[in-house]
Amino acid sequence: MNKHSENSSYREKLIEHLFIGELLKLSWREKDCRLEVGKPEIGNSYYDVILQENKVVRHVQLKASFIGSKTSRQNVNLKLADKPSGCIIWIYFDEESLKLGPYYFFGDIPGQPLPSLSDANVAKHTKGNQEGVKTERPNLRVLNKGNFKIFDTIEQLYEALFEAKKAF
């Protein structure tokens, strides 16, 4: 077992903090410190972070995979579609240096809800029940990597989040 799997919760929070740090650094350098960051207080939220720049509010579900990972899909909570401008950001990172990027984005332009998930498959539990059946998780849908728009840099992602006319 390696460090990444033994300490997966630690790594998840580390990637989240590095990501937020990159966004804040960009806001500091180029956006007049306009970015605000919030976290849900309750642990059963379907998003991980709230990002706001001026009047654009994004409820973001974060996902992370190391570059070269075989992961090709992610589960998404349907409740994210209830939030204005909800989105999923799938962060790839270098396993050794923890350098972030590329960034996979599933969402719409600012002010628009999450694109429809009606065609997405219903997610299933990873472990079977007593009979070995992997039951459905009705509030989750599966998105394949091909459903995401790829941004190579944090600057491109920032534009997609807050200035979509430039990014899309």
Image (cartoon, rainbow, N blue to C red):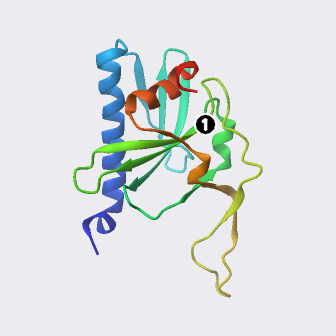
| Residue on which disc 1 sits | 107
Q: Is residue 159 left or right of residue 134?
A: left
* Percent position of residue 72, x then y: 53, 60
Q: Residue at x 39, y 27 (%)?
A: 155
Residue 71 lies, with reference to residue 91, above or below; the image says below
Q: Residue at x 76, y 52 (%)?
A: 119
Instruction: Classify 10 Å Cα crowding around label 1: few (below 14), some (14-19), many (20 and above).
Output: many
**Where, by quadrant of the figure, is residue 58 drawn?**
top right
Instruction: Please name the amino acid that badge 1 sits on.
Output: Gly
Q: Nearer the viewer, residue 56 or 45?
A: 56
Q: Residue at x 30, y 40 (%)?
A: 18
Which quadrant does the N terminus fall into? bottom left
* Percent position of residue 167, x then y: 53, 25
* Percent position of residue 13, x then y: 34, 49
Residue 41 lies, with reference to residue 165, above or below; the image says below
How many discs mark residues in the rendered view?
A: 1
Q: Residue at x 33, y 43 (%)?
A: 100
Local SS, label 1: loop
Residue 62 lies, with reference to residue 57, above or below; the image says below
Q: Nearer the viewer, residue 57 or 114?
A: 114
